[in-house]
Amino acid sequence: MNARLETARLTLRPLTAGDLPAVVPLLGDYDVAKNLTHVAYPYSQKLAEEWLAVTEAKRRAREGFTWSVYRGEILAGVCSIGRQHGRFNLGYWYGKPFWGQGYATEAGTRAVQFAFADLGETALDSGWYEDNPASGRVLEKLGFEPAGFEMIRSEARNATVVCNRVWLTAETFLQKKAA
């Protein structure tokens, strides 16, 4: 499945090697990397290439879908739906110049629609670090509800941090969209 997704302002297209020159400097910003679980700091081209290989294998297996999020011709960040712990998980990150512009909510809405409508999933997981409430607000806007707390190792921080776990059912998402 080579799903290209569109929103009013954004194009979500499968991550490719051509995206990596823009990905590396965005993830090379500690303020971005520290909010992610599996991203090392400093971030490198080699790490990006390894990540691309993993995302391509997951896509082929229909176990994960990672999109480069573009505003016009500029890469703003990445959004993904990937299987973790038996359920698909919504993940995302955006470069600091693109924070606070609604891109995470807009792209996230489209990725969630894809998970429920195209993949037939009935629920999604996600989470946000306690010191990143902006991500929590994005997930709340999408309709995610609290599901507890978990201690998670952040590679960039080289520390364990509190993660607020959340989940969203297809029914809740459809009700929120209808409201």
Image (tube, helix red, strand yellow):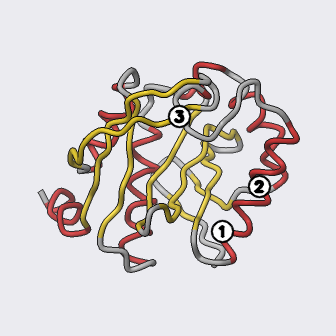
Horizontal side of 70 relative to 169 (left or right) equals right
Answer with left or right where residue 77 lies relative to residue 105: right
Q: Residue furthest left?
A: 179
The tag on residue 87 is: none
Name the spot of residue 10 as percent of width and height, x first.
54, 49
Measured Cα–Cα span from mark 2 to mark 1: 10 Å
Mark 3 → mark 1, Cα distance in angstroms: 22 Å
Task: Tell me the element at label 2.
Answer: helix
Residue count near mark 1 (Cα–Cα under 10 Å), binned few <14, some 14–19, many ≥20: some
Look at the picture and state if 121 lies above or below 106: below
Residue at screen point 77% across, 55% down? 52
Q: Residue at x 58, y 19 (%)?
A: 31
Say which of 157 and 68 sits in front: 157
Give the numbered dot on residue 58.
1
| Residue under the point 64% across and 27% down | 156
Q: Is residue 93 left or right of residue 170?
A: right
Q: Quadrant of the C terminus?
A: bottom left
Q: Secondary structure at mark 3?
A: strand
Labelled disc at residue 153: 3
Residue for badge 2: 52
Question: Does residue 20 appear left or right of residue 77 in this picture?
Answer: right
Q: Front-most of 35 and 135?
A: 35
Marks 3 and 1: which is nearer the front?
3
Query: Tag 3: residue type?
Result: Arg
Pick whichever of labels 2 and 1 is earlier in the sequence.
Answer: 2
